[in-house]
Amino acid sequence: MPAEAGAPPDLRPAAPSAPAHADARGLDGGPPRGSPRSRTHGRSHGISPLPLRTVAIDRYLETIFCIAAEDEPVRPSRIAQWLGVKAPTVSIGLRRLRAGGWIQTELDRRVTLTAAGTDAAETIVRRHRLAECWLTDLLGLDWASAHLEATRLSASLSDTVLARLDISLGEPATCPHGHTIPGRTAPYGELVPLADLRPGAVAAVRRISEIIEHESFELLRALAAAGVRTGVEVTVEPGGSADEITLSVGGRHRAIALAPETARMIWVELVGPSASAVRDGRPWAE
């Protein structure tokens, strides 16, 4: 039976062969047979090779990478919340990842990726983000659906197919949500949270937080329906309050309202004179 997504990682190598009726993901919940993840990772410069990765290990590595990218401390409780599993399950999983050389745990319980763990996580995230680009740019899926489908499909793409896909997409620098594809340079400058702008400020939406992408698909769809997507310019309208920020989107006169906690998860690049319109910690309402 395939391993549950949030289950403790299984570090056992896959069996050398499998019967014809075996699940496509391989035995013991391991990676798809013949996929790049079924190979041993790490260079053998006089050291023992790292254990084989499994689907469960990849979920942990990707989760740690994404939480860290949001400048959050990566602690077991947050990993458990992200994966939707109980704390003891995460404790067992992290112990196995640490034994396998993928992570380190600090004295304050913060989890960090080792060099090998970072390499593996970047490979996983790059695969996912390129799959999202394919699903939105070529197949026309909305960005919330693309995230879900990429989670299901990305692991099955071989290195050869992924490389061809990357070329056909024009080697994009970011995913549809604006996150940089590992190994590429972001095509934008310094970003600030939308919640930190004064009324009258104009900014281009550059990135939607992984937290929205992971935890609130309905909000992600609502933002897209309102036109709040990467590359679109928004203007902060006067008349907002501590509970609500009003925007005009893409030059349209119709305004939309956002809760400040949502606006804090939308990252923007200031445009023109608005570069001086950051509020420097003052209350949003003027």
Image (cartoon, rainbow, N blue to C red):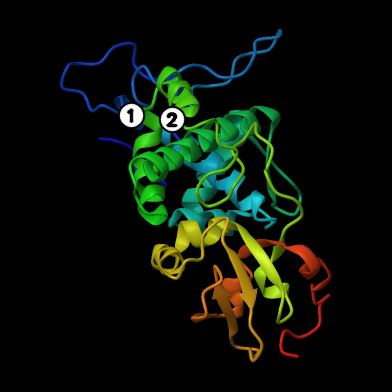
Tell me if residue 56 can be seen. yes
Crowdedness of circle 2 by 10 Å Cα count: few (<14), some, many (20+)?
many
The structure residue drawn at horizontal position 65% and vertical position 55%, both measured from the top left corner, is 70
Q: Amino acid at mark 1?
A: Asp
Where does the image place residue 172, in percent across and percent down from the top left?
Answer: 55, 36
Report the mark closest to the observer, 1 or 2. 2
Is 247 placed above or below 165 here?
below
Residue at 62% x, 43% y is: 180
| Residue 102 spot, x, y in % from top left | 61, 32
Q: Nearer the viewer, residue 9 or 116?
A: 116
Outermost top residue: 46
x, y percent for residue 200? 71, 79
Left or right: residue 205 versus residue 214 is right
| Residue at x 52% of width, y 42% of height | 60
Can you say whether 208 is above or below 126 in the image? Answer: below
Determine which quarter of the picture holds residue 96.
top right
Q: Of helix, strand and loop, which one carries label 1? A: helix
**Of the image marks 1 and 2, the number of the one nearer the N terminus:** 1
Give the number of the disc on residue 54. Answer: 2
Instruction: In the rendered view, tell whether residue 46 sits above or below residue 50.
Output: above
Q: How far across and down, in percent of the image, does residue 9 sit?
A: 46, 37
Pointer 1 residue: 28
Disc 1 crowd, CA 10 A, few/some/many (<14, 14-19, 20+): some
Q: Is residue 163 left or right of residue 150?
A: right
Task: Please tell me whether residue 157 is drawn above or below residue 83 in the rendered image.
Answer: above
> With 18 as the anchor, is 83 left or right in this view?
right
Decide if residue 12 is in sight here. no
